[in-house]
Amino acid sequence: MARTPLYTLSKYGMTMLTLGLAAQTHPRPVAVNCLWPRTTIATAAVQNILGGSATMAVSRRPEIMADAAHVILSWDATETTGKCFIDDDVLRSAGVTDFSVYRYGKVEGSQLKIDLFLSGGRTSMTRPCRVRPGRSSVPKRCPGRRGQG
């Protein structure tokens, strides 16, 4: 934690906010969940702060987060709230089998840089939450769907 206090605080804060909001009573069903990436995501922050081109090459494209968020948002709010999800677990539960389309660089899947809060990352402080498959759908544009290239 000494090397990543701000990142640690942001993850903890978002998780606590998710749990707190999910526990509240709302007049209409509201789902409040977290979505975390399994790997580093190829963003400007990764490029400029976390390792430049070398880290970008072992990252996934942001589209994986968008597609996973789409799946979560399609679930029934009364059945899935107060959960922490990992992007590729969500997509896998929705039938995605090909994750190579999300790679930013040309590395093999085993060479992707795991997020530091997940098992296999630089620091393993938390375990990924289980994914409740639920009623999900993957956007038709999602290239990792079964039966699509």
Image (cartoon, rainbow, N blue to C red):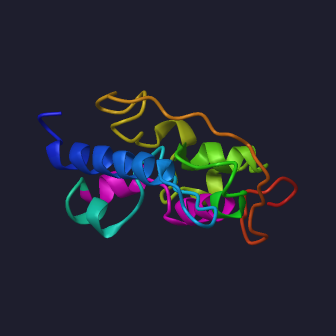
Counting from the top left corner in percent of width and height, residue 44 is at 30, 69
Q: Nearer the viewer, residue 77 or 58?
A: 77
Residue 97 seen: no
Q: Is residue 68 left or right of residue 5?
A: right
The rendered magenta stretch, by its main secondary structure, is classed as helix
Query: What are the residue bounds of the magenta stretch?
Result: 52-71
Q: Quadrant of residue 85?
A: top right
56 in magenta: yes
Q: Residue most toward the right?
A: 147
Q: At 41% from the left edge and 28% from the top edge, which residue is drawn?
A: 120
Counting from the top left corner in percent of width and height, residue 83 is at 54, 44
Q: Is residue 99 left or right of residue 133?
A: left
Q: At 64% from the left edge and 62% from the top edge, which residue is drawn?
A: 29
Q: Nearer the viewer, residue 32 or 84?
A: 32
Query: Above or below — where is 105 with respect to 125?
Result: below
Residue 4 seen: yes
Q: Quadrant of residue 19?
A: top left
Counting from the top left corner in percent of width and height, residue 139 is at 74, 68
Q: At 23% from the left edge and 54% from the top edge, which residue is drawn?
A: 50
Q: Is residue 19 left or right of residue 47?
A: right
